[in-house]
């Protein structure tokens, strides 16, 4: 039976993702999942670009089905762009109706957001309204446009438009950030040559794939104009996460330089949770160190 050309093209991108994940040290489960999906798409008797989300989800699982729908609509696949080093968040944001060049660049520089779902979360939790030039009316327009833009990749189990996604705990995100920075500094990670802000084509950007509980994480230094311009290109870290069921989420982690969290690693937009995490960690550490002193004082 002749293969459908669109199926072959999509399968090639899926198998490329599997290969890149494997070479970049991801665990074997997603590598196998993308490889199996590539085979299923290539061999499918129908043109998969004509299938709806639910049919694709039954065939491939929801996460990969969403990627196939995106590719079938002629759009880039941001996940694969990230693995290649081709990610360009401002260009991605400009695919949302009503998003201009300057606004897209400001959002990326000020919020260090990399994905459309992270942009939607920022619109829902109020961070987007803090960006210069974005008042409540403009944010409402962008939220509506995002809901329409993302509608076609929402399965029945996905949150409704505008809902804030569930996310891994602050402890889990900070642990992924700490592991990334430690291994990047030690030179243990594969490096990408990002296309953006890298005219010389240097392979400087370390990438980490790791897992903690049910969550899978990908971490990279935030390749934003502001971080590079401020000399903090190895401080801001983009942590992308998903649990294989819901849509992909992303947060930026940075070192606070003022306030009660100064000197601490902080998850942008989740500062209150970070305060609680550090308070609990400090309290546990004090209790642990106080115990032996108490016993010695009684001896």
Image: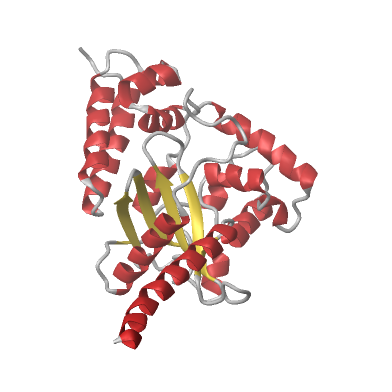
Q: Is residue 133 left or right of residue 180?
A: right
Residue 76 quadrant: top left
Q: Is residue 293 left or right of residue 87?
A: left
| Residue 217, horizontal then vertical, whole percent | 37, 51
Q: Residue at x 35, y 17 (%)?
A: 47
| Residue 246, horizontal then vertical, whole percent | 44, 35
Q: Is residue 210 above or below residue 8?
A: below
| Residue 172, horizontal then vertical, whole percent | 40, 55
Q: Residue at x 43, y 61 (%)?
A: 174
Q: Residue at x 51, y 59 (%)?
A: 252
Report how many numbered discs are placed on residues in the image.
0
Q: Residue at x 29, y 30 (%)?
A: 11
| Residue 193, horizontal then vertical, whole percent | 36, 61
Q: Is residue 60 above or below residue 217?
A: above
Observer-nearest of 212 and 57: 212
**Quarter of the picture holding the C terminus:** bottom left
């Amino acid at each position: 039976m002749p293969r459908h050309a669109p199926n072959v093209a999509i399968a090639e991108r899926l198998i490329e993702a599997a290969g890149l994940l494997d070479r970049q040290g991801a665990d074997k489960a997603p590598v196998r999942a993308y490889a199996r999906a590539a085979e299923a798409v290539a061999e499918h008797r129908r043109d998969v670009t004509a299938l709806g989300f639910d049919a694709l989800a039954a065939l491939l699982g929801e996460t990969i089905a969403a990627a196939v729908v995106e590719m079938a609509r002629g759009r880039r696949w941001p996940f694969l762009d990230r693995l290649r080093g081709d990610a360009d968040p401002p260009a991605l944001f400009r695919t949302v109706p009503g998003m201009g060049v300057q606004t897209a660049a400001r959002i990326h520089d000020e919020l260090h957001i990399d994905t459309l779902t992270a942009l939607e979360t920022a619109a829902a939790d109020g961070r987007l309204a803090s960006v210069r030039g974005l008042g409540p009316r403009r944010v409402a327009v962008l939220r509506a446009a995002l809901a329409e833009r993302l509608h076609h990749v929402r399965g029945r189990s996905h949150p409704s438009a505008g809902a804030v996604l569930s996310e891994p705990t602050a402890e889990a995100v900070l642990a992924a950030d700490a592991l990334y920075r430690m291994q990047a500094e030690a030179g243990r990670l594969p490096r990408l040559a990002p296309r953006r802000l890298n005219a010389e084509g240097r392979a400087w950007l370390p990438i980490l794939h790791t897992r903690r509980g049910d969550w899978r994480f990908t971490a990279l230094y935030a390749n934003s104009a502001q971080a590079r311009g401020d000399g903090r290109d190895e401080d801001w870290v983009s942590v992308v996460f998903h649990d294989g069921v819901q849509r992909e989420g992303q947060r930026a982690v940075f070192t606070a330089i003022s306030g009660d969290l100064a000197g601490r690693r902080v998850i942008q937009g989740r500062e209150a949770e970070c305060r609680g995490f550090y308070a609990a960690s400090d309290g546990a550490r004090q209790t642990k160190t106080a115990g032996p002193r108490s016993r010695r004082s009684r001896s």
